[in-house]
Amino acid sequence: MKISWSPQDKEKFLTFTASTVKLYQTYSYSQGEILPEGSLQISDERYAANIASVSDLPQMKCVEWFPGQTADDIIAIGLASPGKILLSNFGRKGESDLISKEFCPKHQRHCIYLSWNPVHTHFLAEGLDKARNESCIYIWDVNARTNNDLSVLQDRRYSSSMAEASVVKPCLEIGAGDMTSSFSWFKKETWTFVAGMNGKQLRVYDLREPSRAHLITHSKSVFGVCSDPLHESRVAAYSESHVSVWDVRQFEKPILGIPTEREVLKIAWCPTRSGDLAVLCKGSTIVKLYDVRHSVTGTDDLEPVIFDRTLQPNRQHAVNYFAWHPTCENRISTLTPTGHVNDNFIFDKLPISLNANMTPAWIFGRQINIQTYEAEADMSVRIKQRAKQEYGLHRDNLWKNAVVVADEPNLHALWHWLDLSTKLLNKEEVPKKLTKTGRYIGVLDLLHLQDAIEETESEEVCLTWQYPDGIHGGGREKKPMLQYTSKARLRCLQLCGWWYNKEPDDLTDPIELFLDSMVNENMEYERAAAIALFNLKIGRAVEILSSDITVKDTPQLGLVAMALSGFTEERNAMWRKTCTELRLSMKDPYLRAMFSFLASDRDNYDEVLKDDVCMAVKDRVAFACLYLNSSKLLTYLTELCKNLKQKGDLDGILLTGLTNEEGLELLGNYVDLTSDIQTAALAVMYSSPSDLSRNEQVLNWIEGYRDLLNQWKMWHHRAKFDIIQHAIANDQNRVQGQCFVSCNYCGKSIACNRIVASRLRSSTSSYNTNQPPGNKPKNTICPGCRKPLPRCALCLTNLGTPSGSNLHLQEEKSEYEVKLSSFDNWFAWCQTCRHGGHSGHITDWFRDHKECPVTGCQCHCMTLDPNSQLVADNSV
């Protein structure tokens, strides 16, 4: 039993046995739908219904679809005996003249195979059994005249034994006295074919010269020969348990051999993908698929490369036959001995690519599929959106970078911390001995640094509450609160943002400045009240929570203010029990922390620092610096730092800083979790110079971000990134300028000596303020030896520009409002002949000339410039 798809209608196929040919039409259906009676379910989504059949022909050997353009389902049926060919339309009415035509050989012989020419569709090849002195390959012209069209019968037996619609004479007979086993047309070289002959040869014939074979190779693999329809020179055939692949350009021996475990039953090239060969073995439940495109031809030194896959449509039944779909890519159908048909799609490994616009694309067969979707959460999209908003490029005011990521709390806090650390560093609040390893040190560095032990020693300080009436204790019993202070702890509070730097003559409490900024600018009422309470300013906390603006925005805060007003320090008071129960019902972490602080024991603040939903990391660290002794403080901060590093939480930068391996580990975990190399590269860039900025992993982040900007063609953003990176780097590591214009006489730099000359002129001008204009310095002479500068080869005036003459008077050397000289006045000269002049004159000259403008100079300066050669090539 065999199967074959229609070359014209992709929804039709046929199956045939020795006595019946059935035509099927495929349809789609949904799960649960009842299939028509007698139909075949060929896949989970399609079924096939029998629409026609041919069953009155005995001993059918082979069936082939007619490949020409016709509305009729014409097939050629080859009978095993007497070798006759019948063109049929499944017994239905049709308009084609080919229907019911017969082709009869001279002698009765078994038909072995049939094959239509894929381009010249009127040619039909037939293979016949060996007969003495008879040809084994007939090429029939299906448009030839039939028996009843012949005016004179050459042989009487034709008129007695053949039907009137029979064709008795083939247009070509090939292989006299030989035996044939297989046949295949070449699709591109349409007049040629390859055939397996005599069980030991493959021959290539040309219909235009059929008297001899054009190519011959000797091999036992002569069965099932087939040419790759998508490769004009690739041919495959098999023997009992071996498949061979040839290149007809090197037809002496196979380019590839594929051994099989069992006897080969059928092979076929995929008609929609070049180089895919399907192999079916006898009694096997799988079809092997081989990709031979990567095999090496023309050498014996390298092993051939074969990629194989298996298709197993049914584990219980063996596959009896298979057929590739002629038009649907990667579609193959298999047939079992029981007549069950499986329609399968072969899914390749999908190579997926992501272009610079964050659009994924993949290849399925010969199709390129591009997916468009809303990728709001995709990190690459967010990185690009940030870059467009100059993220990380606000060097002078780092807090502006936080504005770009205002919707991302971790990044927002990171840039505010960098901005605060930069301000503290610029105001020399942190001693230089604490910044030897880098610019941005963390809280743990401040507390652990060995050369600052005298600054980390903590002192115990007892402070009293500031009650709502403004009087310490308000007439109540004064129970002081124990806090710890030191220079290191004070700097930690500054890094947490709890301490505003004030001017020396400012008498305002720095905590009050901090609270005002939170209430008026950021409207962080809960946080401001909690920090006021932690600093024992309970009156200020009540004032913040009960203000008109606060109550209007959040009415429930007024109730919290009332609860704080009734605060008492008695341990057994009803207020403490009520606040303990109230704390559990509050969702805001700062409100819970306030009541936990008031109700906690004075030596245990775990409920404040280790709540499930805690305050921000910076506030917890600041609270710990105020109320934990040295041993508890280091233990708590070390444990907190470990947890933040494992989570990749950038809030941990406050503890690790950007100076050591802990900071690198934290950034590495953050990048691994989020793929945000942009933030990691920018943060480390601003920490330069440090050991961290020279780490290989960090350099990979920076280069990866630069490459990303280049892929998006964001050249200006990448250039600004490079400028900031080099500007922040240590001046000692930067290579100083080594190229300058020097005088031919004294050899000194023309630009550098202008400072000295200006000083000399300024000292002499103090004695004579009414110096005439003629004594003004000239730009066309060397400021060192007063000798004239070279002349321009075109205008013959001395070269020279005012650039550099007043640089010593500029306070800021990096930026200039106005250029002192245009580019046209710059010096330009040939590196070969040393002749030159003003840049503008030289440019005008070489627009029309290639040789040097100096009379008598044979140098072709223009042709020596590689850039000019590129321009010349493009113009051609």
Image (cartoon, helix red, strand yellow):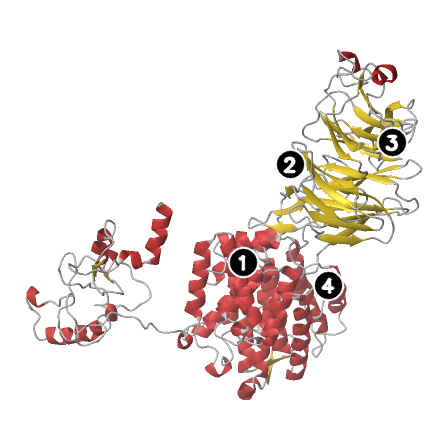
**Earlier sequence position, callout 1 versus callout 4:** 1
CA distance for labels 1 and 2: 76 Å
Residue positioned 78% across, 23% down in the render: 74
Give the residue type at disc 2.
Answer: Lys
Vertical relation: 8 (above or below) 386: above
How packed mark 2 is, by other alpha carbons closer than 10 Å (few <14, some 14-19, many 20 or more), is: some
Determine whether label 4 and label 3 are within 8 Å by CB: no
Question: Foreground mark, 3 or 2?
Answer: 3
Residue that carries the numbered disc 2 in the rendered image: 188
Residue positioned 30% across, 56% down in the render: 863
Which quadrant is home to the C terminus?
Answer: top left
Residue 693 in the figure: left or right of residue 109: left
Vertical relation: 575 (above or below) 350: below
Helix, strand or loop at label 1? It is helix
How packed mark 4 is, by other alpha carbons closer than 10 Å (few <14, some 14-19, many 20 or more), is: some
The image shows residue 218 at horizontal and vertical percentages of: 75, 48
